[in-house]
Amino acid sequence: MSGGASPRLRHNSFDLLRLLFAGTVCLVHAANLSGHAELAWIDRVLSSTVAVRAFFVISGFLVFMSFERSETLWAYAGKRARRILPAYCTVVLLCAVGLAAFSGARAADYFFSPAWLKYVLANLAFLNFLQPTLSGVFAANPVTVVNGALWTLKIEVMFYVAVPLCVWLVRRRGPFRTLAGLYGLSVAYAWAMTALAAQSGEALHAELARQLPGQMAYFVSGAFFYYFLPLFERHPARFVLPALLILAADRFVPLPALEPFALATVVVWSGLSLRAGNWARHGDFSYGVYILHFPLIQLFVQEGWLRGRPFAFLAAVIAATLAAAYFMWHRVEKRFLLRDSHFVGQAGG
């Protein structure tokens, strides 16, 4: 069972949602990293945590669809690699080389330090936590990490690797049993790590709670709606209304066993129901916004650009991020996509 024939799989607003979620993360980071009291309201109104979880939901829906539509495992792997690696490698190397101009260390000490090589190798391998900083870069900032948004990319890649096994289980055991089982294991893991963090006070346990097993519930919830799209389209209210009630209640009484599926319901329903036009005709800038905004904000903070002018700072960060994302799409991302890619086809229309 899947929604393979549904016209909503071709005409939807997931591209717009991803841009909005990437923008949300950018705005929250701009407020938090800058420390401007005048921007603190952004963190109260918007949630980067919810935005990241929503990203995982959309990935679950679209990546399972990508695998099911791929003729071979290698075709699937090629599509995933072309979509994520060129821009990711570009931003890692661009920061490693370009930020030398803004480092407090001498060029020789910067490039020939073990930290520089470790940064390049660790970040290219999606192991950002092993070396998140560069010598003399952002050292005086409240946060010294070069690109704190990249932690989700290793989870995304692990999702991609897990999908073939998940689909194999789906074909053997059925989509409901497989996805429900993975969902339950994910929720149990996140709950156990969160409880352990509260008991021990160790930040490591809280960090582990938000890693791959804990995020899998969002990913497989997105996959659920791909496999059961006909059912969802016939009875949307039976899913959406309870989901809205659960999300509202979760703000007051945490419902960790229900929140991932409820969020996925609202995200997928929004992506399939909104009629926002062709947002991909000029390109998909959401990925560029997501992976580029953090070092740009850090650079503004370090150099003191527009210090004391919080709203001008925010506007400049948004403009710089969009410009960089536009350049990344047209000069890097688009060049590596296949001609029959959704994004290439939309951009040419």
Image: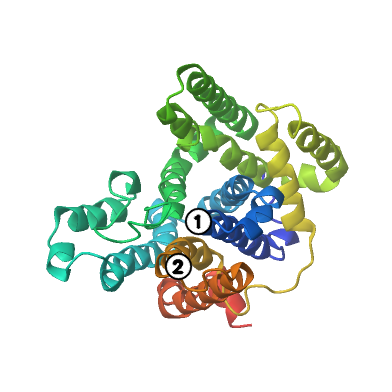
Label 1 vs 2, first from the N-terminus: 1
Q: Residue at x 37, y 53 (%)?
A: 144
Q: Nearer the viewer, residue 52 or 98?
A: 98
Work out which residue is located at the far bottom of the displayed protein and give it: 348
Q: Residue at x 65, y 62 (%)?
A: 20
- Which mark, by number, is residue 85? none
Find residue 142 and report its horizontal and vertical position in percent.
43, 52
Which structural element holds mark 1?
helix
Query: From this viewpoint, is residue 6 visible?
Result: no
Find residue 85 and report its horizontal and vertical position in percent.
38, 61
Q: Nearer the viewer, residue 198 or 261?
A: 198
Find residue 311 and report its horizontal and vertical position in percent.
63, 70
What amino acid does circle 1 point to?
Leu
What amino acid does circle 2 point to?
Leu
Q: CA distance from mark 1 to mark 2?
A: 11 Å
Q: Which residue is mark 1?
A: 33
Q: Residues within 10 Å of mark 2 (few under 14, many from 20)?
A: many
Query: The N terminus is located in which quarter?
Result: top right
- Which mark, by number, is residue 296? 2
Which structural element holds mark 2?
helix
Q: Is residue 97 above or below residue 252?
A: below
